[in-house]
């Protein structure tokens, strides 16, 4: 439960009114639902284990790889559908989201 709270922003609210708190709770839990949906769409499996930390790690790795490849690669020489690219995107994640 701690990872859900810390990774979704649930504990980062400073609001005090009931309406603002309700909005923040709904937004945080919606973010978790959308993250689960994205993880299912990436992997193509319905019964896979879900980890918000793994999904965030994969998104960070993918962004970093894209930036590096955009800066270093010449046009048309980058194959982002290769297994090596997918393996590097999942580096450091608890579960491989796509392989």
Image (spheres, helix red, strand yellow):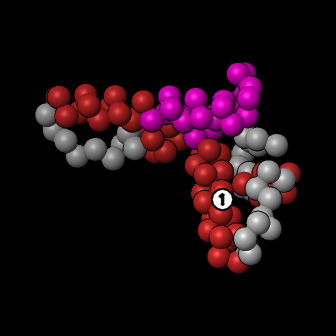
Circle 1 residue: 61
Instruction: Give the main secondary structure, helix, strand or loop, of the magenta stretch.
Output: helix
**Quadrant in the picture for residue 70:** bottom right
- Whether residue 87 is visible to the viewer of this picture, yes or no, is no
Find out whether residue 26 is within the magenta segment: no
Where residue 78 sits: x, y (%)?
A: 77, 64
Res 19 seen here: yes
Question: What is the secondary structure assignment of the residue under circle 1?
Answer: helix
Q: Residue visible at 28% across and 44% down? A: 13
Which residues are drawn in magenta?
A: 31-52
Could you tell me residue 16's position as x and y percent? Answer: 16, 38
The front one of 66 and 95 is: 66
Task: Locate the C terminus and report the quarter of the image it occupies.
Answer: top right
**Image point (17%, 28%), residue name:** 19
Residue 1 in picture, x, y percent from top left: 51, 33
Vertical arrangement, residue 97 with respect to residue 74, above or below: above
Q: Does residue 41 appear to the left or right of 4 in the view shown?
A: right
């Amino acid at each position: 439960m701690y990872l859900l709270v810390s990774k979704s922003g649930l504990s980062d609210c400073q609001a005090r009114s009931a309406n603002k708190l309700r909005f923040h709770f709904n937004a945080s839990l919606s973010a978790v639902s959308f993250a689960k949906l994205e993880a299912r769409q990436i992997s193509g499996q319905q019964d896979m284990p879900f980890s918000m930390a793994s999904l965030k790690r994969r998104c960070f790795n993918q962004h970093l790889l894209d930036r590096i490849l955009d800066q270093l690669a010449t046009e048309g020489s980058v194959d982002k559908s290769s297994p090596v690219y997918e393996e590097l995107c999942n580096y450091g994640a608890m579960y491989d989201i796509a392989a």
